[in-house]
Image (tube, grey):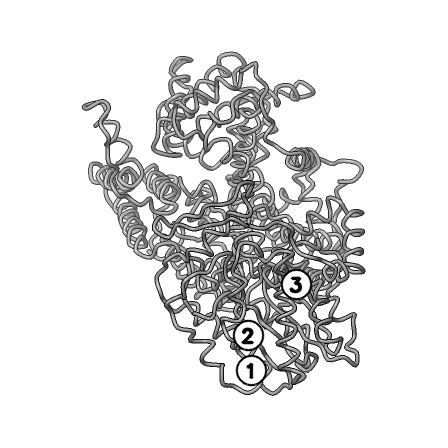
Amino acid sequence: MELPEIQRAIEALPIESRRDLLVWLQATDMPRGWGLFRKRKPKHPVTLKRAVLWSLVSLALFLALDAAIFRSGWYYNYLEPNSTTGQLESQLFWLRHERPGATPEVAAIGDSRIAEGFSARKATAVSGDKLHFWNLAVSGSSPRGWYYLLRDGDPTHRRFKAIAFGIDHYSDQDGIETPATRISDLNYVVGRLRLTDCLDFSQSFLVPDFQHSVFVGCLFKGVTLRRDVQGLLENRKQRFAQAKDWRNNGHGYIDGYGGKPEDLTGLTRNSDTKTLNFPPGTKDWQSATALATVFHADAPQTGELTAYRKRWLGRIVEMYKDSPTQLIFLELPRAPLPTPELAARSRFIDSIRNRPKITVLPKEMFRDLEHPEVFADGLHLNEKGRPIFSERLGNTITELVLGR
Amino acid sequence: MLFTTLNFVVFLAIVLSLFYLLPRPARRYLLLASSLFFYMAWNAKFVVLILGLITIDYFAALWIIHKRGHARRMALLVSLCANVGLLGWFKYANFFRETFLHVLHPGMAVQPLDIILPLGISFHTFQSISYVIDVYRGEQPAITSYLDYALFVAFFPQLVAGPIVRAKEFFVDYFNWRAPTGEEWQRGVAMILTGFVKKLICADQFASVADRYYSNPQALPGLLPAWSGTIAFGLQIFFDFSGYTDIAIGVALLFGFHFPENFRRPYLAASVTEFWRRWHMTLSGWLRDYIYISAGGNRRGKVRTWANLMLTMLLGGLWHGASWNFIVWGGFHGAMLSIERAIWGKGERRGVVRIPLAIATFLIVNVGWAFFRAKTLTAAGFVMRQMVSPTPGEMLLNPVQVKLAAATLLIALAEEYRGALTWLTQSPAWLRTAAVVLTLLAIEIFTASDQSLPFVYFQF
């Protein structure tokens, strides 16, 4: 029979028969083969109910597998140590595995300025070993990340005698960058987010597109961690070894770190032209940040920073409201050269200043460190600045906590 | 609302649940309301345009069946003018204006008119045109219910980027609706997942290479960048568009509608003629039935056949976009089809000879993609020259992308010769479940882009 004849015969069929024919064709439209793809006839035709149930079971199994990998904490043992998630998770790992001893503990929290500028070992020594300092700083982190770090790192809110928060300036002056829309914050805290956090956490990002991405990234953590997973799959052996070494020895590496050797000695400024004269031999990474810190860029003042600080630092304050832990806020050395005061008021700091168990250190406390000799670049103290800052902060906290 | 976003997944879950929970008579209202909501999620005001076209075509079809002679032709003409006119205005006004002004005043800088292209206009106008023409030809009864007709045009799985569903295909299912069988449901789920993998893992992976090359081809001279950048685009557009239609077909199947196949592993074609039988099949079928055959097809001698092929492909090229690049692309394919017709006739080649022919066809099709993707004809000309350049240059596809392309070729061969997808949907439950779970995990972990990239064919 020729194809046109078959077509005409099919067209003459009633519609129901044509549909049955279609279903039959779909089921048989496959060469009768051998081997792997041999056609099989199901013993019992699958009903719609069973097919829907199968879809739901498959989805549930996927969610269970996803949870087993990314929500059980298993995967976080193998994170790339230097990744954003890896840094924060490492701090939590060490906190969990070093049980509190008889010596009261103090945590310093902040971004890379604390990570580079504060030596926990030095501060502990300054206290005469009466306090045990932790440097829990995570480079690039922000108050949003600190909240989740403390929520999971100190679940009873009683572990630390004091927690010091290093912030860049007390003033709530808005900058060009809006911290509330920093989507990379998701990568820091993805390991800490529970399903119940997803809505609230994503809503804090203000921009609808970001809110959507963050919500998906919180719900399906593999989406957020996919580059890390791909990296692991590419070189499993190396990653396992690297992760193991960092878990076992990383805290020691950080404790023994002495700071960057570079400095900016010779740096001068021309306020009229808003330019900096760098000393010969300055590298790009050193000069890149200096302009932004020495000359604070004008940005529209919308009150976003106040709202952001109220939301995230405010939550930390609330979390420790009934705890014996003392919260200490300090303004970090701002730039390698003294800079004018920012115009905007310190609304958030002023609102918590007089609360019990909260200490706001004088903002001038570290201003004398704003010199190019003790800065490695535009943001970070170097190996000369680190011991001075650590000693002074250690002493101050020891006095506050132990009263000497 | 992109198919590959969580918003769409939630939307689909809600509509699907309501569809099966509601009594049967209420379902068409639900589908129409959800389809309009889906469209309005992109731009609410353009819903007026689509409803306007639906109204015109609906009444034109009724007019055609109730009148005779001149009045029928007038109704057809009104409908065609409305569809082609609106498509022409939104899609081609700037192109023709610019071309006209450049002819009158060479070198003049023309400020384009501020016209937003309504989403999916190229697809739903073609559906509407085919419906009215079929009614006029007596091949399709006119739909008497406005709601039914509106749903045919606006049904959300195919509204934005096809497949271009004919009225008879849609209404066969619609008027004889029955729930999908278990196997159809499983096939629908498999197609949706396949579409997600094609778009998120494959298309977006190759998009990065194609974008890098075609953003400035002059910056990457040489043979390898030209070929690898163009092949990357060829793979991107295939995975992107066929991924979209896989999702559309799969979603429709979950509602009990059988959409026509739109892609059948086109890069395994052993000739350009066969390529067009496998690539965007619903558009090829539309162009064949309403342009090629209407113009006389192959009934008026060889020369007329070649001319008809050329005309059809030129219009097909222009359908893709208002630029000379698309017209040249269409002309290139028209020329290839005519040459093949002159040398080989219509027959398909079988056996081992298909292997070198498939490779040659793949390369020819990719030469065409250079016109399709390049921003200007000058840029396309540069890419053409680089494709035969003696300088090797830099290979733009990385090893992971080459492996991905090879893996997809093996899957395509397995599907072509062994019906792998059908086999999988009929395999034991544990195997199907494992396949779904691992596919979802792969989508989660291997999605290529940080952002939801829109489908390429949305711009058409």
Q: Residues within 10 Å of mark 3 (few under 14, many from 20)?
A: many
Residue A273, which numbered label? Answer: none
Side (left or right) of B197 relative to A257: left
Q: Name the residue tied to disc 3.
A: A387
Residue A358, which numbered label? Answer: 1
Q: Are marks 1 and 2 on the same chain?
A: yes
The chain letter under disc 3 is: A
The C terminus of chain B: image quadrant? top left
The N terminus of chain B: image quadrant? bottom left
Side (left or right) of B97 relative to B356: left
Q: CA distance from mark 1 to mark 3?
A: 25 Å
Residues marked 1 and 2 touching at CB (< 8 Å) = yes
Picture coordinates of residue B31, whole percent (x, y): 44, 59
- The answer to which of marks 1 and 3 sits earlier in the sequence is 1
Q: Name the residue tied to disc 2.
A: A329
Picture coordinates of residue B226, whole percent (x, y): 53, 24
Q: Residues within 10 Å of mark 2 (few under 14, many from 20)?
A: many
Q: Tell me the kind of residue under disc 2.
A: Phe
Q: Tell me the kind of residue under disc 3.
A: Pro
The vertical placement of B444 against B16, above or below, is above
Residues marked 1 and 3 touching at CB (< 8 Å) = no
Q: Say which quarter of the image contains residue B242.
A: top right
Q: Tell me the kind of residue under disc 1.
A: Ile
Q: Secondary structure at mark 2?
A: strand
Picture coordinates of residue B424, whole percent (x, y): 70, 47
